[in-house]
Image (spheres, rainbow, N blue to C red):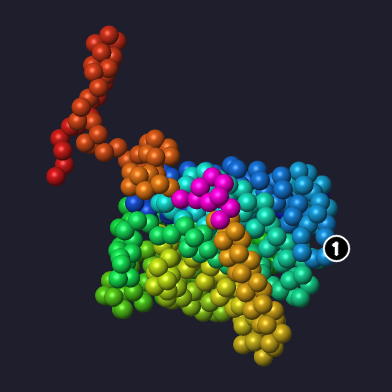
Amino acid sequence: MEFLYLNTIWVVLAAAMVLFMEGGFSLLEAGLVRTKNAVNVTMKIFVDLTIGALAFWLVGFGFMFGADKMGFIGTSLFGSPQNIALDLQLPSAAFILFQLGFAVASISIISGAVAERMNFKAYILMAALVAMFLYPISGHWVWQADGWLAKLGMKDFAGSGVIHAMAGFAALAMAWVLGPRRGRFNSDGSANVFAPSNIPLASCGTFILWFGWFGFNAGSTLDASSPALSVIALNTMLAAAAGGSSALLFTMFKYGKADPSMTMNGALAGLVAITAGVAYVESLSAIIIGAIGGILVIGATLLVDRLKIDDPVGAVAVHGFNGIFGTIAVGLFDSAEGFFTTGNTSLLFVQILGALVLSIWGFAGGFAMAHFTRITVGLRASAKEEEEGLDMAYHGIPAYNDLERFVDVPSSLYDFQATTGVNVVQPKTTKVS
């Protein structure tokens, strides 16, 4: 009974940390997009936490953890996930809450890649579809005991493949079908850089994601007494530090300046890459995996740009490419079965197969969702909405008050002051040059 209480507290706290990562996604995306779209990316994160969470609870959980005789899809627990029979010292409600956090995170990965030009209604529909079908089915294949990839022996402790590779390549497909932001690429193939609105804000988002990742990885033990818990937390930290370090040093020596956005994405890439093997590798291996991830994210970002696919926050490079690498890295560095540690190739082949299957599943799902939303609610914002900014077009409010908006003070303010005696502080009207 004591373990039940401890596990409940641990998993609920870990779930809260995973859900708090949504604040990190919001700040990171708001800081990396242009000011006129900062509210919109934040509202999309609210969609993930509201509509996405409900869709997973009602439908997705059943597809992911429901009974299955074929190994491909669950067929029970729809609308009643609390009826799941757990082989754990853990209440079903705590387990469901933790899984909700993972489902919501898988949607938010896609959010950044489609930023600044996606129809808001299309995003709502996409979020529901990811939570109901795309993520749960990939999770069923790997994390359900009778899933077909699980039966082959695939290892993905906390989701480099199930979540990050899958969602990263769904994001790639959707960004490709959606097309780039207007003016992003020139007719000669060169790219125009859209300056981010607020790098310190994006860095705060990165710090929150980094913090939440300890719940993401260590929480996946689902056991407060697990002897692996502290090792998992340490490996998480080391991989993130190595990814940020390699990206920082590479940009500093290659381009003469330490690039902030690449350093942030390097740390996140290290986190993505270690997520699959965090419980299975030694700490030195975690550092190597993270450092490779930090370099890989730079090359992948350049590749996505060369393909003329517009990804405003680098989600495809961070999550898609490093999700594949992290999944395969388990087959290389696993302490018990890795190729580099034991010479064994069987796990490596399974990991390669799993990484490819999950990425293809994500890409196919993203491609299908993009076309489905196009013919139903419309996929892309209009040229006028994109030019105006999605904040005003879809939400009617800017992220920051522009001083020039208040040059003409409404007479109602003076009337209010005159009739009530309340002093209304007028905004300054001096234009800033």
Residue for point 16% across, 42% down: 432
Q: Which residue, as the protein is rendered here, is positioned at the far top? A: 419
Note whether 337 is above or below 271 in the view shown. below
> Majority secondary structure of the magenta segment?
helix
**Does residue 221 show up magenta in the picture?**
no
Front residue of 112/215: it is 112
Note whether 254 is above or below 15 in the view shown. below
According to the picture, the residue beneath numbered tag 1 turns out to be 69
Residue for point 21% across, 36% down: 404
**Does residue 378 show up magenta in the picture?**
yes
Would you identify the image quadrant in which residue 401 lies? top left
The span shown in magenta is: 371-380
Residue for point 31% across, 74% down: 252
Q: Position of residue 312 (x, y in %)?
A: 40, 59
Front residue of 421/350: it is 350
Q: Position of residue 17 (x, y in %)?
A: 57, 52
**Residue 201 visible in the shown view:** no
From the viewer's perspective, tell me whether residue 347 is left or right of residue 273: right
From the viewer's perspective, tell me whether residue 402 is left or right of residue 283: left
Front residue of 262/353: it is 353
**Residue 191 visible in the shown view:** yes
Q: Position of residue 422 (x, y in %)?
A: 28, 15
